[in-house]
Amino acid sequence: MTSPQTLRLSSLVLLILAGSATIAAAWGFELIGGYVPCRLCLEQRVPYYVGLPVALLALGLILRNNAAALSSLLLLVVAGVFAYGSGLGIYQAGAEWGFWLGPSDCGGGTAAPTSAGDLLTALSNTRVVSCTEASWRMLGLSFAGWNAVASGAVAVLAIISLVAHRRAKA
């Protein structure tokens, strides 16, 4: 049987690795694959930018055996942040499938032109990305759908870490 200490550390390390791999994949699809993210896609990255550093801080506190209450609070924050990210992914995926309306102000594209002379060229070359149209699907899930799964899994790992942390300290 796995000890709470081992479960706590392994689930927290897995959380950090899974979250890092997910955000790296998002950047890879954008920078290497050429997929332009919409505003809502970029908003779904924020939980990774917030949650992963908080998870690293919690891991550091746990490894030093310091501040058990603070590390518990940090794990709870990580779970909440990634649950929010999963909710955003569900919202966008549902809008892509037409289950509900998506945001009316959502669009994206390339950067603004740097000079007035480039304005017409930029207008003809700019791709406007809608939050309600999936640009890619794998196994029926879009980027937003996969983010909902990944963020949800990371939130569950944070809860597992929190429960194991509480048991290890009891």
Image: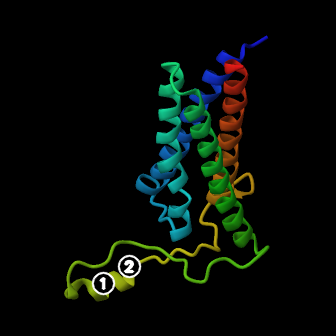
Q: Secondary structure at mark 2?
A: helix
164 is higher (above) or lower (below) than 46 = above
Percent across and percent down for residue 122 are 32, 81
What is the x, y in percent for residue 126? 40, 78
Instruction: Say whether residue 15 is left or right of residue 27.
Output: right
Mark number displayed over residue 163: none
Please tell me which residue is depicted at 65% across the width and 56% down the height of the picture.
Answer: 84
Q: Position of residue 147 (x, y in %)?
A: 63, 52
Residue 134 drawn above or below residue 157: below
Residue 131 location, quadrant = bottom right
Amino acid under disc 1: Thr
Residue placed most toward the observer, 29 or 19: 19
Q: Residue at x 38, y 72 (%)?
A: 110
Q: Indicate which disc residue 125 carries.
A: 2
Instruction: Find the residue positioned furthest to the top.
Output: 1
Q: Of the numbered discs in the image, which one, if any, rests on residue 121?
A: 1
Front-most of 34 and 162?
162
Q: Is residue 70 above or below residue 109?
A: above
Residue depicted at 62% across the width and 78% down the height: 103
- Which element type, helix, strand or loop, lies under badge 1? helix
Q: Which quadrant would the N terminus be assigned to in this image?
A: top right
Q: Position of residue 127 (x, y in %)?
A: 45, 76
146 relative position to 58: left or right: right
Instruction: Report if the CB atoms under discs 2 and 1 are less than 8 Å apart.
Output: yes
Query: How many numbered marks are there?
Result: 2
Dot 1 alpha-carbon crowd within 10 angstroms: few under 14, some 14 to 19, many 20 or more = few
Query: Which residue type carries mark 2?
Result: Asn
The image's colouring method is rainbow
State left or right for residue 74 relative to residue 161. Answer: left
